[in-house]
Image (cartoon, rainbow, N blue to C red):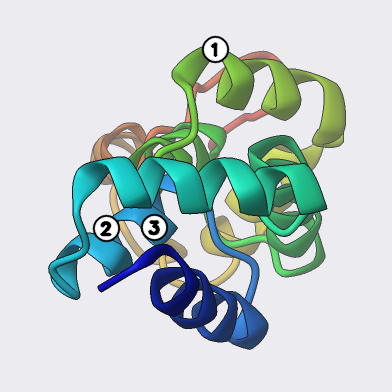
Amino acid sequence: MNFEQAKERAVKYLVLALRTEKEVKDKLRKLNVEEDIIDEVCEYLKGLGYINDVYYTEAYLRQCESIPKYSKYEIKMKLIQKGIDKDLASEKIANNLNQNYEVKIVDKLMNGKLKNMEPLKQKVYLYRRGFKLTDNIELD
């Protein structure tokens, strides 16, 4: 596959949703595109602004905040799996997520799924999910 064909396939892949650079590279690798062409396509698409991991991270965090479901740790791990640098993920989570983000989720869990559990089981569940129990987050 030449540069133009690879570029066309990558653009079609990006039209469906925002993607990280790693996701685009993985997709092109599945299509058996040569590594030097993959790098060239990614640089071209980054130059056009079609691939932007910083913007992707910010958009992902906005989505997570609108539908609070995951702990900050879970969000960070999901971003890293998508190819986002761990330092970038940590920085954006610290700067972009509301301070009370995890408190809302824990409150929701405590009033729902964890309501009838023993306190120790509640703590274990929350720790397993990556929540850090601080002064803001209290268990009954």
SS type, badge 1: helix
Q: Is 137 placed left or right of 41 in the picture? A: right
Q: CB of mark 2 within 8 Å of CB of mark 3?
A: yes
Residue shown at 22% from the left, 45% from the top: 35
The residue to which callout 1 is attached is: 87
Residue 42's spot in the image, x, y percent?
51, 48
Q: CB of mark 1 within 8 Å of CB of mark 2?
A: no
Q: Kindly identify the amino acid type of the residue bearing the numbered disc 3.
A: Glu
The residue to which callout 2 is attached is: 26
The residue to which callout 3 is attached is: 23
Q: CA distance from mark 1 to mark 3?
A: 19 Å
Q: Kindly identify the amino acid type of the residue bearing the numbered disc 1.
A: Asp
Q: Quadrant of residue 6?
A: bottom left
Residue shown at 44% from the left, 81% from the top: 9
Nearer to us in this view, 73 or 44 = 44
Nearer to us in this view, 38 or 20 = 38
